[in-house]
Amino acid sequence: MGQNIYLSNYELEEAMKLYFSKISPTKQKEVMKTEDASGRITASPVYSKISSPFYNNRQLWMESP
């Protein structure tokens, strides 16, 4: 059974050309519901009005002796 090669090495300029040819960046912004934003990238940070949960729910992991 032959080995599958999943990674390739490219020179930086060639890799950047390939990367930017696969995406279509835009400077347009649009407002939409969170449910409709699947697969999208935010133009600016997104903040919540309230925290969920509203209390500190941090768990501490301790190693067994």
Image: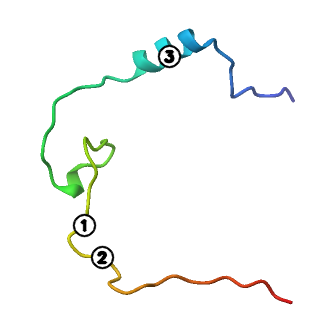
Separation of marks 2 and 1 at Cα, in angstroms: 7 Å
Q: Quadrant of the N terminus?
A: top right
Q: Position of residue 12 (x, y in %)?
A: 59, 14
- What amino acid type should be assigned to the residue bearing mark 3? Met
Separation of marks 2 and 3 at Cα, in angstroms: 39 Å
Is residue 24 positioned above or below 59 on the image?
Answer: above
| Left or right: where 38 falls relative to 13 | left
Q: Which sits in the foreground, 40 or 4? A: 40
Q: Position of residue 6 (x, y in %)?
A: 69, 28
Mark 2 — residue? 51
Separation of marks 1 and 3 at Cα, in angstroms: 34 Å
| Left or right: where 13 falls relative to 2 | left
Q: Residues within 10 Å of mark 3 (few under 14, many from 20)?
A: few
In primary-sequence order, the first of circles 1 and 3 is 3
Is residue 30 positioned above or below 59 on the image?
Answer: above
**Element type where label 1 sits in the image:** loop
- What amino acid type should be assigned to the residue bearing mark 1? Ser
At x 26%, y 55%, the residue is 46
At x 22%, y 56%, the residue is 34
Mark 1 — residue? 48
